[in-house]
Amino acid sequence: MFRLTFATSLLVVLGATVLAASSDDKTPTIEQIMDKLHKGANSPLAKLKKGLASNTPDWKAVQKSTKQFATLGAELPKNEAPKGDQASFKKLADAYASSTKALDDAAQQEELAPAKAAFRKIGASCKACHTAHRPD
């Protein structure tokens, strides 16, 4: 009887672990990505705008924000276009992800000019994607 109870308990724990792990692997939505990265005065976007304006940035703070950009930016192409052509969205989302990676790579190397260039490229990508794919 003890073995049966133990085995059942073990299966319940393993099942719960698998369910918890699979829920953590869910791709964030486009809205969640944009809100986390771009929304508010304390967003990574706002922090980077301020941090990269300095000739001597606080690289640890900048790197924390660029890591968030790279991590969430890589998730963007996994979403479906809410409006418009899927191939167009994929191309723009891949370019955004590439720019966020370039931003993080430059920040990790503490290279200000390439970090600023990648940050500008991210900002310049907004309008094209929003115009073609943002729901009304």
Image: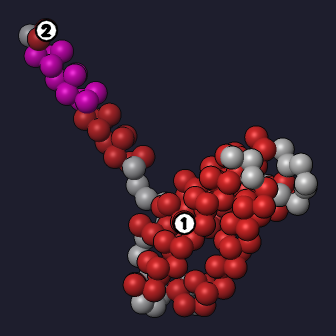
- Residue 116 is at least partly visible in this image: yes
Q: Residue at x 61, y 60 (%)?
A: 102
Above-or-below relation of 118 to 42? below
Would residue 6 be counted in the magenta stretch?
yes
Q: Which residue is mark 2?
A: 2
**Disc 2: CA contacts within 10 A as few (<14), some (14-19) or many (>=20):** few
Res 46 quadrant in image: bottom right
Q: Horizontal and vertical percent for residue 115?
A: 73, 59
Count of numbered labels shown in the rendering: 2
Q: Position of residue 28 (x, y in %)?
A: 49, 60
Q: Secondary structure at mark 2?
A: helix
Q: Nearer the viewer, residue 98 or 81?
A: 98
Secondary structure category for the residue under label 1: helix
Q: Is residue 32 above or below residue 125?
A: above
Q: Is residue 82 magenta?
A: no
At a point 82% along the width and 62% down the height, the residue shown is 49
The answer to whether any part of residue 40 appears in the image is no
Task: Tell me the tag on residue 98.
Answer: 1
Mark 1 or mark 2: name the one nearer the start of the chain: 2
Tag 1: residue type? Answer: Ser
**Quadrant containing the N terminus in the rendered view:** top left
Up the image or down, 42 lies above or below 133; here it is: above
The residue sitting at the right extreme is 55
> Whole-percent x and y of residue 113?
78, 61
Magenta-colored span: 4-14
In the rendered image, residue 108, in percent from the top left (x then y), is placed at 67, 46
User: In terms of secondary structure, what is the magenta stretch mainly?
Assistant: helix
Of residues 95 and 112, the one drawn nearer to the viewer in this rendering: 112
- Tell which tag, 1 or 2, sits nearer the viewer: 1
Instruction: Kindly identify the residue that appears in the image at 32 percent across and 34 percent down.
Output: 17
